[in-house]
Image (tube, grey):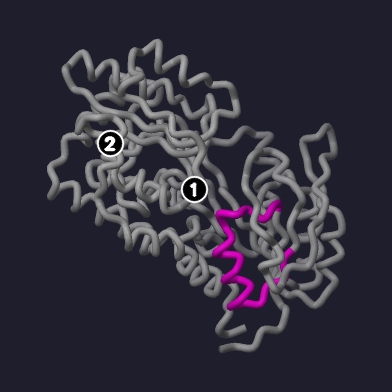
Amino acid sequence: MKALDNKYCLIYNFPQHYRSSTFKNMDRELGFKFYFGDSMIFAQDVKEMDVNELNGFVKRVKNTRILFKKFIWQSGVVGLVFKDYQHFILYGEPSYLSNWCIMLLAKILRKKTYLWMHGIKGQLTFKDKLIRYPFYYLADKMLLYSDYSRNLMLTMGFRGDKMSTIYNSLDYENQIEVRNNLVKSNIYINHFGNTLPVLIYIGRIQKSKKLNLILESMCILRKKNINCNLIIVGEDKEQVYLEELVIESNLSKNTWLFGPCYEEKKIGELIYNADVCVSPGNVGLTAMHSFVYGTPLITHSNFEKQGPEFEVIQPTFNGDFFEEDNAEDLSGKISMWIGLNEDKREQVRKLTYKIIDERYNPQYQMNVLKKTLNYNND
C-alpha cells in the first residue's frame, strides 16, 4: 500500500452520518485530513457522525452566515492552503465564500482543488451564471452526484474531463450485512390483518414530500376496487398532521404510521417486505435505502426538483416516474407495481440490488476519488 503523506485535505460543511463509510475509507486508504463545519446552515435534522472515529480528523470550524445571511464563511480554513496539503476537496456550493479564497490561492500556489457537489440541476438565471460559472471554473475538477447534472453541464459548455460522477452512498457495508440475512416475514400480515400489497414511504415527513398524494392515490384505487396498505416510517417535524389526513381519507385500517426508526435491521425488514416505495415529492437518500433492500421506487418526473438519486430509477424495470402532483397518474403507476407476481418481484429485487452494488457505494466513490486525485501516480 502506498505510504500516506498528508497531501489530502477535505474541508466540508458538516460530517453527515450517512457519509461516514466514505469518510472512513478516505481516512484509511488516502490519509485525508478532515475539517468539518459545525452546522448544516440550510438544512436541519441531519444526523452527524462521530468525527473522532477518523484518525485524520483535525477540527470543527465555525460556519458563519454573512452578507445578508445568504453566504457562509468557514473560519480558519483559508490559511490551510499554505500548509503542506497539495489537494483540497471542498464543499461545492458557491455560497461558501471561504472556498473562493482557497481556490484562488491554490491557483497561485499550484495546488489542486476539487468541488464535491450537486452541480447544476436546471436552467440558470443570468445572476446565477455570474456566480456559478466562475466558481466552477476555478476548480481543477468537479465531483458530481449525478449523471443528469453532468450531462446538463456539458450542454452548458463545461468540459467533460473536469467532471466526474461520484454518486452517493449510505452505510453500505452494514446494509449488505442486514440484506444478506433478510427473509420474507409476516410483519405486514400480522399488523394489518390482511394480505393486501404494501406501499412504503421512509424518510423525513415534510410538506415538500407531499405524502397526501399517496393517500389520494389509495382513495382513487379503492374506487376501482384495488386496495393496498401503507406504512410511513419517519417523524413528523413540520406539523403535516398525517394522522388527520389518514382519518379524513378513511384509510386508518390500511395505514401504519410507524414513526421514526434508526434500527437498520428493522428498516431492512420493513422495506424488503413491502411491494413498492412511493416518494411523491423530491426523492433523495430514500432511493438508495429502498434499492439496497430490493424494493422498487416511484417518484415524480420533474427532475429539476429532484435529488440526484432519482436517476437510479429505470422506468418499468426497477421503478417509475409519475407526473408531478398528479394523484391520478400516481395511482396508475402504483397499480402496475403492486400487481407483480412472485417471479417478477424477485427479478425487480435483483435489479435494484445491482445498481447499488455497482455504483452507489463507498468503494465506488473511493475509486472515483483515487482516479480524480491521480493517486497511484501522484
Q: In the image, residue 243 lies at what x, y percent? A: 46, 19
Query: Tag 2, which secondary structure?
Result: helix
Q: Is residue 3 left or right of residue 152?
A: right
Residue 84 x, y percent position in the rendering: 80, 77
Task: Tell me the magenta residue range.
Answer: 13-34
Q: Quick check: 183 above or below 59?
A: above
Q: Amino acid at mark 1?
A: Ser
- Name the spot of residue 267 as percent of width and height, x first: 42, 47
> Which residue corresponds to the image point at 60% horizontal and 54% vertical from the top-left?
17
Q: How many marks?
A: 2
In the rendered image, the vertical position of residue 76 relative to residue 298, given as above or below:
below
Of 97 and 229, nearer the camera is 229
- Look at 49% across and 65% down and name the residue there: 362
Residue indicated by mark 2: 190
Assess whether mark 1 and mark 2 are in contact (beta carbons under 8 angstroms): no
Quarter of the figure that contains the N terminus? bottom right
Point 55% across, 44% down: residue: 120
Determine the CA span between mark 2 and mark 1: 44 Å
Q: Which residue is mark 1?
A: 149
**Which residue is pictured at 78% across the width and 40% down the height?**
71
Label of residue 112 in the image: none
Amino acid under disc 2: Asn
Q: Is residue 301 visible?
A: no
**Is residue 20 covered in magenta?**
yes
Percent x, y of residue 49: 64, 57
